[in-house]
Structure formats: C-alpha cells, structure tokens
Image (tube, rainbow, N blue to C red):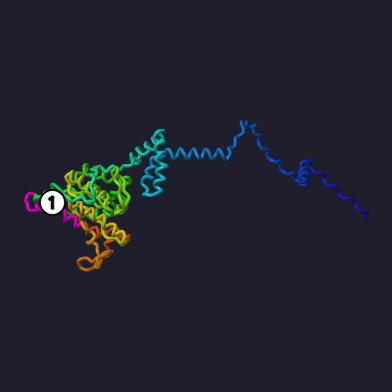
Amino acid sequence: MADRPLPQLPPLLDDATRTLERAAAPTPPPEPRRRRARPPRDEGTPRRQWSAGHALVVSVLALALGLLLNAPGIHKSAFNKPAGWERDVALAFTGPLAGISDALLLDRPREGIQALVGRSGADEIHTDLGIPSPSPASPTRPAPAARPKPEPTRKLAFSPQKKLRIWIAGDSLVITPGYAIVRAAGASPAIEAVGSVDGRVATGLTRPDVFNWFDEIRRQVKKLRPRAVVLAFGGNDDKAYMTGVPKGTELGDFGSWSWRKEYGRRVGGLMDTINRAGAFVIWIGLPQTRSADQTRRFDVVNAVAQRQARKRAGRAAYIDTYTMFAGDDGGYAQYLADGSGRLEKVRSDDGVHFERIGGDMIARLVLKELNKEFDLTSWRKKPNA
C-alpha cells in the first residue's frame, strides 16, 4: 500500500503569525528616559574666593567690635579681680578699651539690653561707701576719754497692733540663721520680719565694687523702715585687699593697724547709717571654722566688729557665735549636745556654714537681744491690748 501524502495544515492567520514572531524575537531594551532639557542658566560674575588673609582680617575686626560692644562689662570683670599683676594688666588693657567704647557710643546697645531685662547700671563700678572718711591720726594717738554711760531710758513697747519690724542682711553666713530668725519672729505676736532675708554669697564690706552693701542698706532701711536690723558680715572680708579706700590712704597687710582702722570705719559707718534711720543693730559675729588659719583670720574681723558695737552701746549689740559653737575642748565642733545630751549637727559639711539647728541657736540669742532692747511683752498685761 503506497504511502499516502499527509494533509497540509491550514495557514495561520496574520495576527497569530505576528504574535508568534514577536514572541520568538528578543525583547529590545527599554529606551532610556530622556530628561527635560533645562534652559542654560546665566552664571553671572564668577564667585570670588577670599584668601586666608582676608578671612583673618574679618575675624580680627569682628573680635575688635565685640570687645568694644562689651567693653564696660569686661572692664568691670577686670576691676573685680583679686589684687595682683593679672588685675593690673587687665585694667591697663580694659580701661582704655572702655573709654573708646564710650567715646564711639558703642556701649549704648549693651546699656539698652540691660535696661530691657531690668539690669540697668550693672556695669557701673560703685566704690563710694557714703560714710565719713577717717581723720588723719597716728597709731600712738591717745584714746579719747570714755563717755559717761547714758541714763537708762524707757524701752520702746511693741504689740500685735504695733509690731517691731526687723530686717536681716549679710553674706552667705546670714542665710540659715536669717530664716531661723524669721520663723522665731513669726511665733511672736509683737515682731514682724520685713523684706526677705537679704543674704548674698561671696560679698562683704571690703569689695563694694563686687556688691555695694553701703548703698543697699541705705536703700532698704529707707524703704522698709525697720526698727531693728540684724547683720552678719566678715566671712569674705578676711583679705588684705579693699576697694573704696579713701584717696591717699594706704593699707598694710590683713590685720595690720591700718587695715583694722579702715575695716572698723566700714563696720561703724554701717551701724551709724542704720542708727540714723532709727533702727537698732544686732551684729552676728563669725564662728569658728574647721580651718585653724581661717578661724584666726575670723578672730581679727570679730575683734573689729565687737569693738564698734561696744562704742555704740544702746544702739548696737554683738552676738558672739565663736564660743557658742565651740566643742568641749574649746575648738571647732560640727555636733553639739542638746539639753538631753543627744548630739545634734549644727555646722554644715563645709566646716563654715550652719545647719538649721545651728541657725535656731543663733535666732534664740537674737530674740534675747531684742527683748533686752525693746518691750515686747507688756501688751499681754493690758486687757484691751
């Protein structure tokens, strides 16, 4: 049987043929996306690069301008430096700088900013104490004859209707006792603490350029009208250097005759300022400290203050904290026994300041002095008081 020819397949349609051809042909890679051409930008004049020399000149000019704008504050900082060659060099540089700043009116923006934040006059250097200058005298000049003791006068009486107004101020050593005095005054119906406890760290009577207590006390006694003022100064005054010294006066070393005389003028001047305002002064003396050297310096300050208070008997009183806080051996003690024999911590860990219980001990002595000077209890005997 002869082979029969195979039947022919039907032809593919054109669309099917094209589909198979496309499937067999390799897929061309996608054309890259063309970015839109940007119009050419006019670069203008090429940027000029400054040299290191130009940058240095600009930096120096900016520094000089900054120094001139802040010259008053820089000069005061130099003035407040401790005595020595560093202070002398700083003053020699900042003094003329402050003068140039003032002449060019470049200090005005700083003054304006200080006025806006309530610190007007912060760059002023106040060394005027506002107390009489000492009369020239010799160390061997005989002491004046003792004044006759004044006749005892009737105590001023105070009551819940007419309270004794007291104000407290000083360096950091007054802060803890000051608040103890305020608490004790609050427990007495006849005493009223006025103002806040004005205790300022790192201040004193030797550096009115740092803080002028003579101006501050004059302002406060005029504003608050206290009848008794409690002060504690000297913790930062055990140095030889002072500002506000009268022209032509030279001070010796700390504790010398000339130093004691000038410091006594300051202590006595404060007491007189308060007395003229009609107030009694209670001066809290300096305590012993853990440092024997510091305690010896405090002895000098205490001796001057105690002498000035004695010269104003009836107008000032001195509270001795030196012996009050002494231990059984007479030296420094951080703990003291209370009435029941239990030890209480009375001094801070820094060996200088007071703990709250130590402040309470001082407050009791202050109230004792107030009761000596004023009548604070007779109102209780009056039925209509």
Which residue occupies the foreground of this view, 383 or 39?
A: 383
**Residue that lies at the very extreme toward the bottom in this rendered image:** 341
Does 234 sit left or right of 69 as displayed? left
| Mark 1 residue element | strand
Q: Which residues are magenta?
A: 363-384
Dividing the picture into quadrants, the one containing residue 75 is top left
Is the stretch drawn in magenta largely helix, strand or loop?
Answer: helix
| Residue 207 on image: x %, y % | 31, 47
- Residue that appears at 65% across and 32% down: 40
| Residue 368 on image: x %, y % | 16, 56
In the depicted structure, whether residue 330 falls above or below residue 46: below
| Residue 93 on image: x %, y % | 42, 42
- Residue that appears at 15% across and 51% down: 313
- Residue type of the residue flagged with mark 1: Phe
- Residue that appears at 22% across and 44% down: 135
Residue at image mark 1 = 374
